[in-house]
Amino acid sequence: PFEVADVELWIFGSSAGQSAQVAGRLGLPFVANYHVSPGTILETVQAYRAAFRPSATLDRPYLVVSADVVVAETDQAAHRIASGYGQWVYSIRSGHGAIPYPNPDTVSELTVAERELVEDRLSTQLVGDPAAVGARLRALQTLTAADELVVTSVAHDHVDRLESHRLLGTRVGAARAAVMLPHADMRARLRGRVIRYEESSVTSVAAGRRVLRQCPSGSRGRCARRRRSGTARSERAHV
């Protein structure tokens, strides 16, 4: 079926291993999962670029980098919305399976041991008002030289999730240089691409353009496959 299907191939990865290397060797676009494994982002990006060979799809690497983002009108409001993030990540990394995203009004604090397991994710989640998060996204783009950033906002209240995307989209739309795309010809070829992650809406932000989609009910497993890091890494790329 693939031989006759008009399908764009994208490869996702969170390490410098097989995914990054295969994407490079086949000349395919690559999505580096900073939001899943922040401690490996630089080596992941380097591995993809080092392995890249021109193809019928791309004549140079095309890199997308993901980030966990929560935006609200104020820093205080954003941190309240994001307060259940640590418990949610811990439930995944501890091997118990993802719990329903905690209510910020009732979520319990992490123990010292629990926090140690998820500290890399907590410290690299981008939380704050539009200006603060926009600045950190620009730093992430500069650090990785990404052609595109894709952000996921996880929240207990779906309204807060949508508002996070709206505020971020407004900020990026007002400052088109927030995400630089050096390969406009490639972006034109790949126009309309929306990357969707299970359990969250995703905004694809590129040169001021914003796209918002919600994974349909019952199809989360088909929206994306996310690779999860089992342990926290000591080295992290902070933005």
Image (cartoon, rainbow, N blue to C red):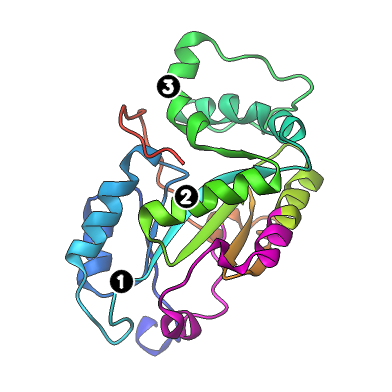
Label 3 and label 1: CA atoms lie apart by 33 Å
- Quadrant location of residue 103? top right
Q: Where is residue 14 in the image (x, y as percent from the top left)?
A: 35, 48
Type of amino acid at the residue the image marks with label 3:
Leu
Residue 26 position (above or below residue 72): below
State yes or no: discs 3 and 2 in contact (Cβ < 8 Å).
Answer: no
- Residue farthest to the top? 112
Q: Give the range drawn in magenta.
A: 168-196
Q: Position of residue 184 (x, y in %)?
A: 46, 81
Type of amino acid at the residue the image marks with label 2:
Ala
Label 3 and label 2: CA atoms lie apart by 25 Å
The label shown at residue 139 is 2
Report the residue marked by disc 3.
117
Which numbered disc flags the more N-terminal residue, 3 or 2?
3
* Mark 2 residue element: helix
The label shown at residue 216 is none
Q: Position of residue 236 (x, y in %)?
A: 35, 35
Horizontally, is 15 left or right of 237 in the view? left
**Magenta-drawn stretch contains 184:** yes
